[in-house]
Amino acid sequence: MTNPCKAFSSGSLCSWEASGRMSRGRAGSTSPESLGHCSPSSVTSPSCGTLHGDGGYQSSSYLSIDGRLLAPVHLDIDTDFHAVREQEKEDIKLLNNQFVTLIEKVQCLEQQNKILTTRWNFLKDQDNSHSESDVKAIYDQYMSKMNQEMQALNYKQENLESELTEVLSTMDSFRSK
């Protein structure tokens, strides 16, 4: 036969170890008679009391136990509450993923902003390096170079026109012969 007291914890009434710690007798006496000494075969003995099927415990000693406390607790959790709880978990996961995406976008935009700021500062520094007098000097240098090229082209044009005139006169002289 199995031990019926094994279903109880070490602090229950039918525990060997607890029987010495719990006083069920008068004026805190610790004798086995007043403690309700319990053994595996004496679960229903008068000194140990009787365990009822409804969760109550009847003891022949002065200890009384409220049977309602030994009854299993049935917490009826509303299925809607559970469904709402699961939906909230899913919503939190979704919002967390969206938050992570937004953080990544913000980090990307911050990086692009740094790049654009660096470019802007670089371009401003380049523009500032050419003061108005520098721009005028660069313009004058460019115009001078263009004037030289134009003079060279005019000189070539005059040379080519004179050669053309010479060739035409030579052709006319050969035709007349």
Image (spheres, grey):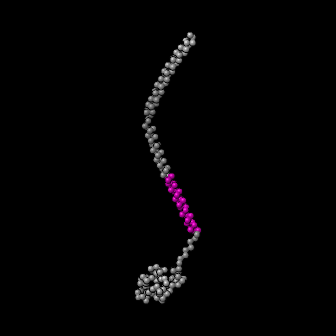
Q: Is residue 85 above or below residue 64?
A: above
Q: Is residue 46 above or below residue 68?
A: below
Left or right: 55 as drawn, with respect to 17 = right
The number of discs equals 0
Q: Where is residue 66 in the image (x, y as percent from the top left)?
A: 51, 82
Q: Which residue lies furthest to the top in this view?
A: 177
Q: What residue is rendered at 47% in x and 80% in y?
A: 6
Task: Tell me if residue 93 is in the magenta stretch.
Answer: yes
**The residue stretch that appears in magenta:** 80-105
**Res 121 quadrant in image:** top left
Q: Which residue lies furthest to the right in this view?
A: 80
Q: Is residue 130 above or below residue 58?
A: above
Q: Which residue is nearer to you in this view: 20 or 112?
A: 20
**Res 27 quadrant in image:** bottom left
Q: Where is residue 81 in the image (x, y as percent from the top left)?
A: 57, 68
Q: What residue is rendered at 48% in x and 47% in y?
A: 112
Q: Residue furthest left?
A: 30
Q: Is residue 21 above or below residue 154?
A: below
Q: Which residue is nearer to you in this view: 168 or 126?
A: 168
Residue 27 can be seen, yes or no: no
Q: Position of residue 62 (x, y in %)?
A: 47, 87
Q: Position of residue 128 (x, y in %)?
A: 44, 38
Residue 164 can be seen, yes or no: yes
The C terminus lies in quadrant: top right
Q: Which residue is nearer to you in this view: 4 or 135?
A: 4
Q: What residue is rendered at 40% in x and 87% in y?
A: 30
Magenta: main secondary structure:
helix
